[in-house]
Amino acid sequence: MKSAKINYLNFEIDKLTRSIENAFTGDSFSTDITNLSRPDLRDITKRNGWLFDWKGEFNKSDREVYKLTIQGNPTIIQGLISLRAETDHVYMPLIESAPFNRGSKKIYLGVPGNMVAYACKFSFQKGFEGFVAFHSKTKLISHYIKTLGAYHFGGHLMIIDTYPAQALINRYFK
């Protein structure tokens, strides 16, 4: 039996905002998180600056892929997240900010935090009390402990439990 490839995530929580925030003006924008659709995949390619194979992720039957957009502007994707419901928690195989939301010249702050908050909300909706797990690159373990309230379970496995999950949800969702 072939074991599933583990992605060691290296997203950075640039700022915990209440939605997403323009990095230059400080203006805040409300967001929507909806299912990624097949037509959305046309522009989500490595050629367009995306780092991961989102078409492959989208086609996996055991997970759901969601897109983060600004309310009223559903065609410009700010970030993507893949979620898989396990027996007692939600696992986050992939998360990625849009190419224009990475690096020192990013347009919006708060994109990764918004998507992780959604993963926590999804976990509560599934009856898992907010528990979210993901694998981290070693250099970011302490960053996730500090910014997300996650704890290091061992190896590269990170867990967000009920209380920090609820705090993230309260911050991003009314």
Image (spheres, rainbow, N blue to C red):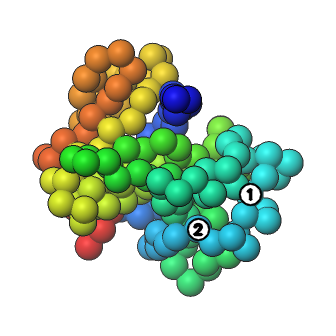
In percent of the image, x 57 and y 53: which residue is there?
Answer: 60
| Residue indicated by mark 2 | 36
Contact, CB < 8 Å: mark 2 with mark 1? yes
Give the residue displayed 29% in from the left and 17% down from the top. Answer: 154
Residue 84's label in the rendered image is none
For label 1, the crowd category at 10 Å Cα-Cα, with few meaning under 14, some 14 to 19 and many 20 or more, is many
Q: Position of residue 5 (x, y in %)?
A: 55, 30
Image coordinates of residue 42 in percent, x first then y, are 79, 65
Q: Position of residue 103 (x, y in %)?
A: 65, 38
Q: From where the camera sits, is residue 138 visible? A: yes
Compared to 149, does 23 lie above or below?
A: below
Residue type pointed to by label 2? Leu
Please state the total of marks drawn on the protein image: 2
Judge from the rendering whether residue 79 lies leftward or rightward of residue 16; answer left or right: right
Q: Return the residue nearer the eye: 161 or 78.
A: 161
Q: Is residue 174 above or below residue 144?
A: below
Residue in the picture at 52% in, 29% down: 1
Kindly give the residue lying farthest to the bottom in the view shown: 72
Sequence order check, earlier mark of 2 and 1:
2
- At label 1, the amino acid type is Ile
Q: Nearer the viewer, residue 2 or 140?
A: 2
SS of the residue at dot 1? Answer: loop
Image quadrant in which the C terminus is located: bottom left
Label 1: which residue?
Answer: 44
The answer to whether residue 169 of the structure is visible from this angle is: no
Q: Secondary structure at mark 2?
A: loop
Measure the alpha-carbon separation of dots 2 and 1: 11 Å
